[in-house]
Image (cartoon, grey):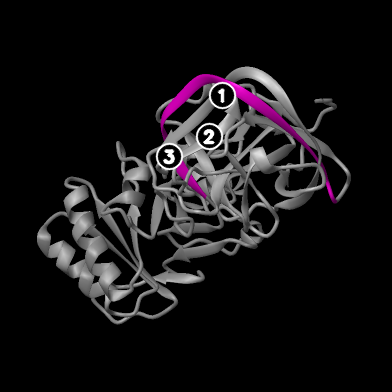
Amino acid sequence: MVDPVKDIIVEATDEVEVGQVLGQMAELGLTKLLVRKPFAADSRLQGITTIGVSGTDVLIADADKQGGPGTAAIIEITTSKDVERAVRAGERGHAFVIVSCRNWVIIPLENLVAEFSRRGRRLYAMLEDGQEVDLLFTVLERGVDGVVVPASMLPRTKERLRSVAVKSPLGLSKARVVRVSDAGLGERACVDTTSTLNVGEGMLVGSMSSFFFLVHSETIPTEYIPTRQFRVNAGAIHSYILGGDDRTRYLSELQSGDTVQMVDCKGSRRLVTVGRVKIERRPLVMVVARAEEGGEEGSVMLQKAETVRLVKPDSTPVAVTGIKEGDYLLVHLAASKGRHFGGSVDEFILER
């Protein structure tokens, strides 16, 4: 799983490409730019950390000489001696070392990730043609600390970069339960992920695209059933869930290989991969709550079972079978109510 502090740098070849790429960087929330040729000061670069050969925030320096917090080194890896050279460069005080692995990728990066991790140094990798961002970020599980993406590759990697770029915590609010009622039989979806989930983590699910409840993972032990530390019993199949790209998805359309967000009670989030979705017919219960701020109402339909839990504002998981009117729950209120193919849009919409 990609660590939320991973970094992404965009590389432009010249001043013309710098101008072409700034809009895409802003769209993705990317703020670091590498240019290996000298370029003039540009007011459009305000708020952008620049990396280059002169007049930039971080200078590209000789990998074989002593560096400092304001320098970075770039090394092409073609032999094992280059791996050793990169490790030595990492010990010379540079802010980070960027490596380019054009032939062998995984084995050299595994060796480098291990060495840089042991030394507490930062390692970045160039994204080459045919390589995947996820591979670089997960080599030896830990992955590199950052990836340098050529501007020419941004269009075809945009969606994946949107998913792995640093995500700020989501705002969670208190909502008061105003009604709990049986909802009859219906199909509910268990989302089985390829990750071990933690106590306190869950998925944001709701019947309305602007009002999500934090549905807790099946990580709480009971005497009747073992934990399923990879699973969230997420609710009725019509429900919205927040996907890895910040778009909503219907639970009914999730499938193996999709990414969804895991969120904890503080709003911190990470991406996990869906391994399987189990849809079965079960008795459902509907929970309706009203946000303390703004008074907006939202609902969620979940399987009526002791192992299905929402989360209280004090971070305590509470079984849906024990929730009653007047209780308070953690919810996420989306800024925009309108959705078009999962993406937010500013339009009139009424969901009830």
Mark 2 vs 1, N-terminal side: 1
Magenta stretch in the rendered image: 270-292
Give the residue displayed 21% in from the left and 56% down from the top: 110
Q: What residue sits right under mark 1 in the picture?
A: 188
Q: What residue sits right under mark 3 in the picture?
A: 225
- Can residue 156 be seen by looking at this rendering? no
SS at circle 3: loop
Give the residue displayed 43% in from the left and 34% down from the top: 192
Mark 2 vs 3, N-terminal side: 3
Give the residue displayed 42% in from the left and 44% down from the top: 227
Q: What residue sits right under mark 2 in the picture?
A: 233
Give the residue displayed 43% in from the left and 39% down from the top: 225
Residue type for callout 1: Arg
Image coordinates of residue 25 in percent, x first then y, are: 57, 48
Residue type for callout 3: Ile
Question: Circle 3: is it few (<14), some (14-19), or many (20+) Cα within 10 Å?
Answer: few
Residue 351 inside the magenta-drawn segment: no
Depth check: give the residue in front, 222 or 220: 222
Could you say which quadrant of the image residue 132 lies in?
Answer: top left
Depth check: give the residue in front, 185 or 128: 185
Mark 3 vs 1, N-terminal side: 1
Image coordinates of residue 207 in percent, x first then y, are: 71, 29
Tag 2 and tag 1, C-beta contact below 8 Å: yes
User: What's the distance in space between the residues labelled 3 and 1, CA to CA?
Assistant: 19 Å
Residue type for callout 2: Asn
Question: Circle 1: is it few (<14), some (14-19), or many (20+) Cα within 10 Å?
Answer: many
User: What's the distance in space between the residues labelled 2 and 3, CA to CA?
Assistant: 14 Å
Task: Note whether 3 is above or below 186 in the view shown.
Answer: below
